[in-house]
Image (cartoon, rainbow, N blue to C red):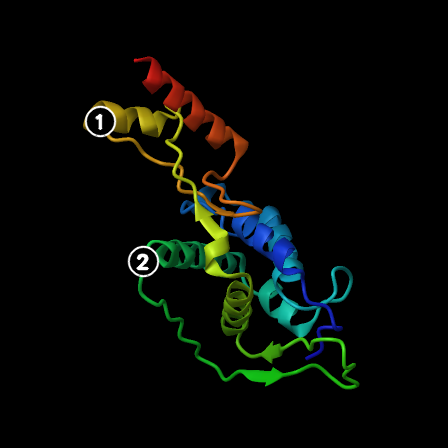
Amino acid sequence: MTSDGWTPPDGEAMTFLLEEFIEVSDDETGAKADAVSCLQDQAARALLPGPRSGAQSLQQLALTGMSPAEFQQLRRDVRDWIRSLMSSSVAHWRTLNGPLRLCLGAPPWPADQKQDLLVEGPALDVFWFYLLHLLSRVGIGRIGICWAARSQKDRDQQALLLQEGVTEYCQRLFLRRGGVKRYCSEFCRGREATARSRKKRR
């Protein structure tokens, strides 16, 4: 049950979640087993309580024990759930099958130190519990959706513009840092600035 008293810092965990964990294709053919296994280990250490290297906690072992196909599907489910959360004004529930066992660490409990909440149970339930716990601490408002138009050099974007006159947007999820941030990267911000300046010149 122990996590060795270590919980990943929220900022690091959120960055990994949005920049690596949910960046998954719907097409399985390009996923290499070694790369998936490596990401499983990284996800266990970045998103679940336990040591950063060496032996793993039971919570981390639950995630790394999933088959590559299960893990890839979990990534898609998390991505789709967060996207739906960001684009809706209603609460999004997750049903856990359980049973789950919860514990507030092991004594002694120093007066000036917060206690890690440890959870054991089915692998998917454990992961979703820690994910929702992370999002509740950080705040959903820290997640942004990039509304920069996709590059016109992108073949899919070219096809949409030619067929339907529709602009497709980046829509990548990203962690807002500091002030209000509207774009996921400097690349998207620069592309939007260029598009605005072209419109002004017309």
Tag 2 secondary structure: loop
Which quarter of the rendered picture does the N terminus lie within?
bottom right
Question: Is the residue 161 above or below the residue 87 in the image?
Answer: above
Residue 196 position within the rendered picture, expressed as x and y whole percent measured from the top left: 38, 23
* Image disc number at residue 165: 1
Q: Quadrant of residue 41?
A: bottom right
Q: N-terminal of the two: label 1 or label 2?
A: 2
Which quarter of the rendered picture does the C terminus lie within?
top left
Q: Is residue 184 left or right of residue 201?
A: right
Tag 1 secondary structure: loop
Residue 200 position within the rendered picture, expressed as x and y whole percent measured from the top left: 34, 18
For badge 1, the amino acid type reads Gly
Q: Quadrant of residue 103?
A: bottom right
Q: Is residue 35 left or right of residue 156?
A: right
Tell me what residue is drawn at x 54 percent, y 52 percent: 21
| Residue located farthest toward the top when viewing the structure as drawn | 201
- For disc 2, the marked residue is 88
Residue 137 position within the rendered picture, expressed as x and y whole percent measured from the top left: 55, 66
Say which of 62 and 13 sits in front.
13
| Residue located farthest toward the left when viewing the structure as drawn | 164
Residue 49 position within the rendered picture, expressed as x and y whole percent measured from the top left: 66, 68
Total marks in image: 2
Q: Is residue 1 left or right of residue 169?
A: right
Camera-nearest label, 1 or 2: 2
Tell me what residue is drawn at x 40 percent, y 59 percent: 81
Mark 1 → mark 2, Cα distance in angstroms? 26 Å
Question: Is the residue 154 above or below the residue 43 in the image?
Answer: above
Tell me what residue is drawn at x 70 percent, y 76 percent: 114
Question: Is the residue 141 above or below the residue 103 in the image?
Answer: above
Question: Is the residue 140 above or below the residue 101 in the image?
Answer: above
